[in-house]
Image: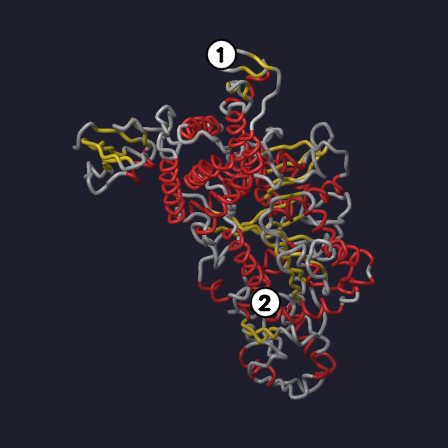
Amino acid sequence: MAASPSLTMDASWSSEESEDFIWPTLPSEGFEDGWLQDSISAASSGSAPLGIEPGRPLCSGCEATPGEKYCTKCNIIICRSCCNAIPTHRGPAPSHPVVSYQEHKLFNEIVSHQAVDENLQHRHDFLSLWFSVDKGKDGKLELKQFPRFSNLVKDHNNRHRHGSDCSVQLVSFIGNTGAGKSTLIRVLMKQPWDIARLTSTEEVSISLPIAGRSGSTIPTSGDVHLYAVPNDPAAGPSNLSLYADCEGFNGGDQEPLAGKAKRSVLAKIGEMIHTKTTESLSWAKDVLLFLKGTHIFPLSFESTREEAVKNLFPRLLYNFSDVVVHVMPWAASRMLEHVIVNLLDWAQNSQKTAVNRVILPHMIVVLNVDLSEEVDWNTATTTERILNEHLRALENNQTISTYCWMLNQLRNSPITTIRELLNCCYSSVQFIRVPPAEKQQLFSRQVQTLDSLIHEATIQARETKAEARCLLHSETQDKMFKMAFEHYKNNLEKPFDFLESLLAARPLDNTLSATLSALLRAAMIAYRSTTAELSGFEFCSIITPTVCSIIALDSYRSSSRHPGTLRNIYKGSTLNFRVGEGEEGAVTYQSQFAAAITEFLEKSCPCDFVYEGKRCVNSFQGHKASMHQDETGSTHFGTFESKFVDDWTRCWNAVIDDCFSELDDPLGKPGTAEQPEESMMVWSAHCLNLRNLYSDLPQLDITKIKTCSWCFYGEPLRSLECGHRVCWACAELVGDSQAGSSNEDKIVVAVGSCELHPTLVRFESPIHIIKESDTTAIVLSSRT
């Protein structure tokens, strides 16, 4: 059996910390010349006396008793008696941390590269692949998205028996090839600091990244793999955290080991099916189903694979991640200024490729395999020291000073620290040092600290999204990923618009514009009956609050609530939209209202031209085919003119902004993506707007609009006695459930009045409605 690294004597042990060392029984001579090393060699030779459990090393001291303790300083395994005889091992000495052999064995299994069939490991890891860059059959590069994300979500929902969708927090690990990303994820997932859990619970099979071989110059991981975070304290039916293991940057065009294994998967499928064993058939079935759910996006730009990875992966991971963990070897820490430049470059280049994002990712920089003999491993101290040590780079480093100057143009106060500069690109930045795994207790403690930093950052990201009402469900997130892949395969430089893409992923019903146009026309008829002097400002202030609350109500009742403030949901883009601009792209509330207004202004607003006391009756659209024309048909030269239209055009965007602000303010800052009380607040505001509308326009008649007369988009069940219509969602709110009764556990609602009049109208015979299901209801002529 090969000598275990755990049995290698630390050279520093015998120098300064062994003065009081006493072995219980020493040979008469030769101790200083090699008794201990001979003992170690004997322990690792594979021989063991009868009665000793196979594989358990013998004590390095007495060579007779199985080892029970392990000193992480001395790197030796000893029995309890020998351990108690050594002063530095007898108590909890910080300089010589002693752990149980079982703890040491479990730890080694977690952090060490397992000497098993590596190709077999990579083939199994194939099913954890999320997206990749490969050559297609025509030799051109393709971006492939595998169904790993949706599979993990499905597993999560099944495990928690969660009927509705969950939201996902994405933690991405990046860094150069060989930095130790996969190993670090592996250790975070196994949590070696929680030995009690590892030894007391049944081992659950989870997919883990493959650790690279020590000394190998070939990249191990390829592309981007995705893993569910086990034992996540924030996990629950509605929350899921995922680790994304990104292929190392600057790895050259040499194919990673995972890539070679990936190519062999298809070749192995036929072989596995041919063997017809239960295990082989199950594996082949899993792979075939996995491949069936793959989406392929041919890249439209010429590039090497390394360049494609460098261009695509940062765009996707920076803009979609809640937390980014940048892993770098401690040996490169002398070049930290260069790392800071890379962080700024990476963020700035990625930021330019997306707009309308809700948050910037949190950044955690890991100085991996730190060989220094530092006493203080505190993360806050490390972060402050590093940032302060490089403060001069604000002036001395040309790239950093250029970024500083650029960002200063967007701020009210100048950037004076590296932290302030980095916080322009990330929600937060922290540095943590992780020692070699040989320093077992310190390593476990630091990785546990890293786990806590990641957990805290994901919570902050989640709260930020919830506050902005952009906590997306996984189904929508998956659609967004696909849209981003589709976008970037053709447009590396054109920004990906998150909000426009959301509206495309969850399209609005474009019939809303026709309903709003009909409402504007009906309101205009009623408005004309109240005044002889038409004012675009006044009419806009009368009708716009109701239109805005219609949009708000539709958004809150949507089965997949659109994220963001109501004003942003309405706009669907950061671009300033105005009537008359192109309407190509995703259907938005703004584009639909604009289409309704355009139709209303062109078809329903009269011309102001008056000749000999007779007003032109042609609308704007009528002027396209003719000139001014009065009610007798007489024509006069001239183009359409309307102060009403001019006033409306000048004020409507501002009035809309004010109305949505009034609706947004009472909603406050929700703690979750959806809250029932918010929907009720919107409903209350909408009812108030309706009452004000009918008070201002008593002659308003909307009975010809074939939708629900309250929300203006719901499918009406039937007309009420007054001619207005009501859908089930509104009937539950305007009706009286107390007047109904339980009909085989079905909800019964009685609608006995209508407030869509200047004064409340009560019916002689209330209409009773029974809810059959979530989507159907029936109306009864009399109560049952």
Pinpoint residue 346: horizontal percent, then vertical percent: 72, 51
Pinpoint residue 641: horizontal percent, then vertical percent: 58, 25
Inspect this view and state whether residue 275 appears.
no
Q: Look at 81% across and 63% down and name the residue there.
A: 395
Out of 531 and 325, give the one closest to the viewer.
531
Pinpoint residue 203: horizontal percent, then vertical percent: 48, 56
Is label 2 in contact with label 1 (beta carbons under 8 Å)?
no
| Mark 1 crowd level (few <14, some 14–19, many ≥20, 10 Å Cα) | few
- Residue 61 in which image quadrant: bottom right
| Mark 2 crowd level (few <14, some 14–19, many ≥20, 10 Å Cα) | many
Q: Look at 57% across and 17% down and name the residue there.
A: 628
- Residue 545 in which image quadrant: top left
The amino acid type of the residue labelled 1 equals Thr
Disc with the residue nearer the chain's start (2 vs 1):
2
Tell whether 540 sits left or right of 332.
left
**Residue designated by label 2:** 444
**Foreground disc of the pair 2, 1:** 1
Tell whether 283 sits left or right of 741.
right
* Colour scheme: secondary structure
Q: Look at 72% across and 39% down and name the residue there.
A: 493
Inspect this view and state whether residue 640 appears.
yes
Tell whether 480 sits left or right of 512.
right
